Image (tube, grey):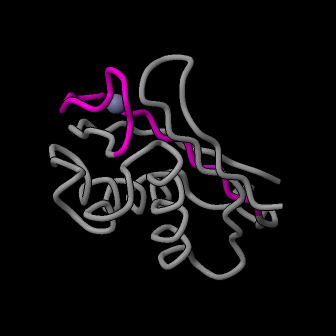
């Protein structure tokens, strides 16, 4: 069974080697969705939503109200939705309890525009 939680963070960024609106510094209220998979336990849950939200919030606090271009790994990597999703995937995997498999991270920089990193 899959469960999911969502949260948001606010941050500024600009894109390097890019011609267009996003080459100038600007901000987004990013929305993040995380989906994990596991067995439904005797208590009827794959994982307590509160525990998953806490893990997500801890990781998003690394990015919240930051200038993304000035923090690792975005000092060199362009802080695109795609790279943010990869970063979150990696950080979340380090924190999830055993038996819980991370399957999807979605990063939306504005409604209807974002990146999905899905494990197959
Ligand atoms: Zn942007």
Tell which of 53 and 30 is nearer to you.
Answer: 30
Image location of residue 114, percent across then percent down: 54, 32
Residue 58 vertical position relative to residue 110 in the rendered view, above or below: below
Side of 85 relative to 65 (left or right)? right
Q: Quadrant of ligand 1?
A: top left
Residue range (magenta): 17-37
Tell which of 105 and 26 is nearer to you.
Answer: 26
Image location of residue 2, percent across then percent down: 76, 51
Please tell me which residue is depicted at 25% across the width and 63% down the height of the picture.
75
Please tell me which residue is depicted at 16% across the width and 58% down the height of the picture.
70
Is residue 25 covered in magenta? yes
The quadrant where residue 19 appears: top left
Image location of residue 91, percent across then percent down: 45, 70
Disc tally is 0
Side of 65 relative to 38 (left or right)? left
Please tell me which residue is depicted at 38% across the width and 37% down the height of the picture.
18
Side of 71 relative to 84 (left or right)? left
Q: Quadrant of the N terminus?
A: bottom right
Residue 33 vertical position relative to residue 22 in the rendered view, above or below: below
Is residue 64 covered in magenta? no
The quadrant where residue 13 appears: top left
Q: Quadrant of the C terminus?
A: bottom right
């Amino acid at each position: 069974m899959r469960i999911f939680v969502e949260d948001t963070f606010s941050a500024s960024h600009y894109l390097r080697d890019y011609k267009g609106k996003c080459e100038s510094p600007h901000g987004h209220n990013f929305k993040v969705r995380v989906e994990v998979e596991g067995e439904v336990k005797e208590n009827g849950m794959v994982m307590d939503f509160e525990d998953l939200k806490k893990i997500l919030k801890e990781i998003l606090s690394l990015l919240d109200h930051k200038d993304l271009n000035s923090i690792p790994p975005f000092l060199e990597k362009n802080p695109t939705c795609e790279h943010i999703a990869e970063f979150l995937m990696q950080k979340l995997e380090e924190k999830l309890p055993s038996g819980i498999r991370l399957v999807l991270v979605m990063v939306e920089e504005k409604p209807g525009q974002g990146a999905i990193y899905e494990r197959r």
